[in-house]
Image (cartoon, rainbow, N blue to C red):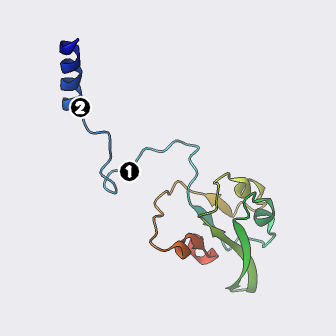
Amino acid sequence: MIVKSIETVMKEMVKKPATLEYPDEKEELTDNYRGVHKLDMKTCISCAACARICPNQTITMVDVDTEKGVKKMPEINLERCLYCALCEEVCPTKCLSLTKDYDFVKYDRREYVKRPEDLE
């Protein structure tokens, strides 16, 4: 009994640590991982389908100055987001997508609200 316990402890001592040296080492992500949103402002048609389908009311449409004048574009609150990808699925021009970026640590809660310019 004691010998088996000592043997288990010795095996665990020579194992490589399970934690990663973040940010030097990053975790391997699966193909279906959903991270921070990306918006192509040039192809957005301001339909607001993403804001209407969002189950958590994470997306609001805000005015943005563009080359063609003022347009309504999605502003996303990452704190509230469920990363369900419904906004990505419903977008008719596929201008809104979820990336594999998971590095979005902030010190101020207001930084989680991403304006359309921040999503490019």
The correct choice, above or below, for 49 with respect to 114 in the image is: above
Q: Nearer the viewer, residue 69 or 84?
A: 84
Residue at (72, 75) in percent of width and height: 73
Q: Position of residue 49 (x, y in %)?
A: 80, 64
Crowd tier of the residue under label 2, counting other residues whose Cα lies within 10 Å: few below 14, some 14–19, many 20 or above? few
Q: Identify the residue at image location x=29%, y=51%.
A: 21
Residue 26, numbered circle: 1
CB under 8 Å between callouts 2 and 1?
no
Q: Residue at x 78, y 73 (%)?
A: 46
Instruction: Please name the residue that numbered disc 2 is placed on.
Output: 15
Residue 106 picture location, percent across and down? 46, 69
Image quadrant holding the N terminus, namely top left
Residue furthest to the top? 1
**Residue nearer the viewer, 77 or 45:** 77
Say the numbered circle drawn on residue 9.
none
Question: Residue at position x 78%, y 72% from top?
Answer: 45
Amino acid carrying label 1: it is Lys
Query: In the structure shown, which secondary structural element does the residue marked by tag 1 occupy?
Result: loop
Q: Is residue 23 left or right of residue 40?
A: left
92 shown above or below 116: above
Whether residue 120 is visible here, answered yes or no, is: no
Asked if residue 83 can be seen in this view, the reply is: yes
Left or right of residue 78: residue 5: left
Q: Nearer the viewer, residue 59 or 56?
A: 56
Residue reaching furthest front? 2
Q: Is residue 99 left or right of residue 46?
A: left
Q: Name the secondary structure under disc 2.
A: loop
**Snapshot quadrant of residue 47:** bottom right
